[in-house]
Amino acid sequence: MLELFTTAFVTFFVAIDPPGVAPIFGALTEGSPKSHRRQMAYKSVFTAAGVLLGFALGGGWLLNAMHISMDAFRASGGVLLFLMALEMIFEKRTERREERAEKISEEDHHIAGTLEDISVFPMAIPMLAGPGSIATIMLFMSEAGTLMEQGIVLASVGINLLICLVVFLAIGPVMRFIGESMAAMITRILGVILAALAAQFIFDGIRGAFIGG
């Protein structure tokens, strides 16, 4: 059980990437009142939790309805996570998030006197509950054989989202503590770990497809 929790926690930490989304949240809420920033933090995390929970509980049914085997989804999910890992290692993911944040900020400047709701888009979707985290939770839930194992997977997701919430609520001191260079280093290390986990998903999917055939 401890091994499952550790693997799931690390995988979701990499997929959700709290050190990577924290600067984006800070940029999108820069200059906003503390009350608005706090509201955006809670709303974005709870929205992401709802989306991930929905895919965790209904993802298997969706695959069956579309006649997609779990081995095929496991292999394709591994490929998706591997591409995400490459982007993290070469900082492409961070650049794309920063460009999206700048675009949102520029559009918001055209609306004078208003505070934009960035909780659902882009914070909850796709930054917290993106393709990587959705594929990850569906993969782990499909491999969890018991209710206890499923609970462990959901707990690992919940703890990661709780970390995001705490970081969002304390975004100012956190950004001063981490710094840009430290955040970049953490992102690269997590990218290497994610690449290894993604390769394992791909190998498991291919092996399962051949054995099943």
Image (tube, helix red, strand yellow):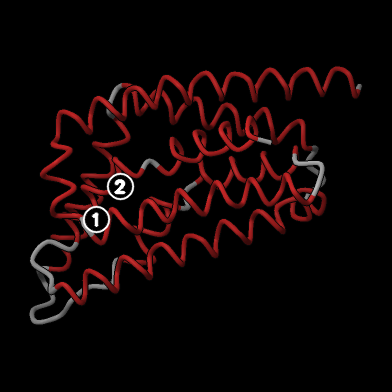
Of residues 203 and 18, which is closer to you in this image? 18
Mark 2: amino acid: Val
Q: Which residue is drawn at 10% across and 44% down?
A: 176
x, y (%) of residue 199? 58, 19
Left-right relation of 39 to 1: left
x, y (%) of residue 27? 16, 54
Distance between the Cα atoms at labels 1 and 2?
Answer: 6 Å
Quarter of the rendering occupied by the C terminus = top right
| Secondary structure under the numbered disc 1 in the rendered image | helix
Left-right relation of 36 to 132: left
Q: Does the residue at mark 1 contact the one at mark 2 (Cβ under 8 Å)? A: yes
x, y (%) of residue 61? 78, 55
Name the residue at the right extreme: 213
Q: Which residue is under mark 1? A: 25
Left-right relation of 56 to 104: right
Using the rendered view, name the quadrant where residue 212 is placed. Answer: top right
Quarter of the rendering occupied by the N terminus = top right
Crowding at label 2, few (<14), some or many (≥20) Cα neighbours within 10 Å? many
Residue 211's disc is none
Q: Residue at x 57, y 26 (%)?
A: 79
Using the rendered view, name the quadrant where residue 51 is placed. Answer: bottom right
Of residues 4 and 80, which is closer to you in this image? 4
Image vertical order of residue 199 relative to residue 45, above or below: above
Using the rendered view, name the quadrant where residue 122 is placed. Answer: bottom left
Q: Which residue is under mark 2? A: 21
Left-right relation of 29 to 129: left
Mark 1: amino acid: Phe
| Secondary structure under the numbered disc 2 in the rendered image | helix
